[in-house]
Every structure is written in C-alpha cells, then in structure tokens.
Image (cartoon, helix red, strand yellow):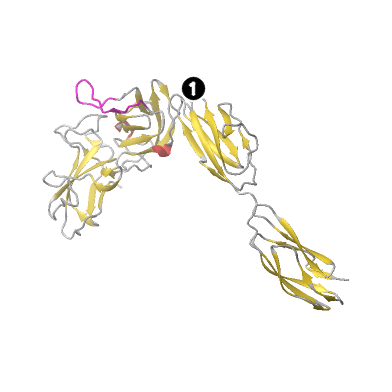
Amino acid sequence: TYSFTPVNQSVQPPGGNFTLGIGTTCTWTASTTTPWLAINAGGTTGNGTLSYTVAPNNSVASRTGSILINNQTYAVTQFGSGCNYTVAPLTANYNATGGQGQISVQTDSACSWTVQNSASWIGNLNVGGVAVTSPSGNATLTYTVAANNTSQSRTTTLTVAGQSVTVNQAGVGILFTAQSVVNGASFLSGQIAPGELITIFGSALGPTPPVGLQLTPDGQHVTTSLGGTQVLFDGVAAPITYVSDTQVNAIVPFELSGSAVSTQVQVVVQGIPSSSVTEFLASSSPAIFTLSGGIGQGAVLNQDNSPNSTSNPAAVGSVLQVYITGAGQTKPAGIDGQLAGSNPAQPLGAVTATVGGVPAPVQYAGSSSGLVAGVTQVNVLVPQGTPSGNSVPLGVQVGA
C-alpha cells in the first residue's frame, strides 16, 4: 500500500520543482512518460521523497500528466494560461454621417470570442467579410455606423471578447465635451475667464473647408456667426475667429464677469444646437500665446518688434512684448469682438511677470491696437540677473 503527500498536485503555468512524500513499506522506483514532467531523484525502500520538475505551460489549455510509482499512478495537473484578449480601439467617435469601423482582437488561435450589440444603428458586424457569431484567434471585426439624422448625439457599447467598446456618434449638430473646451493660447482645459480666446475641439463643428475670421460691415468687430456656426454662452452668441469640422475658435463674452460661477456652452450648426456642456468661470485664467499650440517658444516680440528666438534673443534691460489671453474683465469694460483702438483697456487684476524666475517689471498691460478684445499685450522689462540661454521660462500672472 502507498500514501502520497500531497494526494495530487496542481501546478501554475510557470511550472517549477516539486516534491512528493511517499509512505510505504515496499521498495519503490518512479518513472514518467509525460514529456513535460522530469524525475529528479527518488526511489528507496520504505518511506521517502520524490523530487520532480514541471516544465512551463505556454498553451491556453490546462494539461494533466502522471508519475508511475511502481504500479501506482500519481496525477499532476498544470493550469494553462487561459484566453487573454487585446481589443483595440476601446473608443470610436463618428460624425452624423456615420461610416465604417474596425476593431482588432488579438488572442491565441484556440480562443473563441463573441460580439454583443444592442444598437440598431450599428450593423454589418463581420470578420473577413463573413458574419460570424463566435470567431476564434486573431481577427479584425468590421462594422458600419448608420447616419444620425437627429440633432442629439448617441452612444452605445459593443461587447467584444468580453471587453466594452464605446461608440459615440454626433448628431447633425456636434460632438464635444467640457474637457475639449480649452484656452486658445495654452490648449489646456480648466476654468475660463470673460474675454478669453478659447478653442473647442470635436466633430461636426462646422464646414469643410475651414472658414477664417470675418468682420462686421463696419470693420470694427469680429462676427458672431461664421460658416453657419455659432457658439452660445448662456444663450449669448460669442465672437468666432475660426471654424472647421473639428475646431472652433471663439471668445468668451465679457458679460459673464460678475458673481456667476459657471456657464452653459452650446455650438449651433446650421441652426441646430448641440447638447450643453458646463464650463466653470474664473475672474482670470491667463495663458501666453506660443508659436506652436501652447508649447515651446513664446510668440514674443523683442523691443525692436522682431520675433524673439534662439537666434534673436532679448538683451537684459530691453522690453519684451508678450501676448496673453484670459486676463478677464477690463477697465473700461470689454466689448465682445471689438478690435482695439488707440484707447487702451487694461485688466482689472494686477499683472506681474517673471523672466527666468526673476521678478520682471511690467511697463504696460492692456489691449493692443488692431487686435481683438481679449488679447492682452504685456510689456515686460528683462531684469538684471536674468539667466541667459536658449530656453528661459517666462511667466505672467493676472490677479490671483
């Protein structure tokens, strides 16, 4: 008779070295015909210990082998890695016209997976042009998104290989979120300020090709409708400087200054409004314009009006012309979309600056003739002690 400790062995996929305690009064030896089991040492008369090694299991399925101790069979079960799935993309966005989409599934060839879809506007799900209910292994799932003829966006979730894939479709209006409303200088989201130039990213925002800034017939104001698109803040139409299918540049109305803490933003395309998103307000939310979408070299002029650059640096004691937006309400009060004239409008909040971390005197902060209200020119004296170099940080603060 024989007793085994443990009674049987279960092993994780990486395998490893194991021992088996054998209780008996007989003389015994051990052998195996299982290719992924190897006997290391064991065999004696009476009680003893058998040492053996289990090789890694790189397959999906579990497997069972055995060790023969005289005429007794000892079972060893090793788990497989199981079916793991990589699904991409997990989010897809479409405009109102719809279109075709693809979802990639990567897994072991022995692994099957399913697709679940409850949306009537998602159809023609197939792999390799053939509609299948339970594909196996690596594959590309294709589908079609029907046109959305309503003004409201819609969302559904496909379950592909056990993972959720979110499909968003804009209505005839637009698809955008509160986070896609960003400062027009820094391209960062956050609180917005009266007069701030902002950018809205999304889909179905306006015409293709894009339409640039247009002025009212008197040549003194930026229009509040461009290419059939309007941007509303609590129902007030904002000046628009650029519009395309994926981007709108607008100016937050000065009327929002005061005690309000938030505003509702809508984009209206060809008379059809989008859903509203909530944006929170601040008295100021300044950012410096750059040469490349919110990063890198500032769009700064030297004292002689030449562009500041690594090859054209500013000298200590000279004056930099810095352009910012988000300085907030002005004195006198800003007029939406108005081009600045010879009478300057200055921010209500105090404006300070640093160059290379050194406090820098601000000689002027206010409107810049010919530029739209909401753009603030800040003239900064490069102070003594400013470090030299090709990348010296510049900071401007307005109020708090």
Q: Which residues are drawn in magenta?
A: 206-223
Which residue is outermost to the bottom? 45
Q: Position of residue 295 (x, y in %)?
A: 30, 47
Residue wearing tag 1: 150
Q: Is residue 59 left or right of residue 145?
A: right
Secondary structure found at label 1: loop
Q: Position of residue 201 (x, y in %)?
A: 38, 35
Indicate yes or no whether the magenta region holds residue 383: no
Residues 58 and 22: in front is 58
The amino acid sitting under disc 1 is: Thr
Number of numbered labels in the structure image: 1
User: Which residue is depicted at the point 50% across and 33% down?
Assistant: 101
Q: Quadrant of residue 199?
A: top left
Judge whether residue 154 can be spotted in this image. Answer: yes
**Quarter of the figure with the N terminus:** bottom right
Q: Position of residue 354 (x, y in %)?
A: 23, 53
Judge whether residue 280 can be spotted in this image. Answer: no
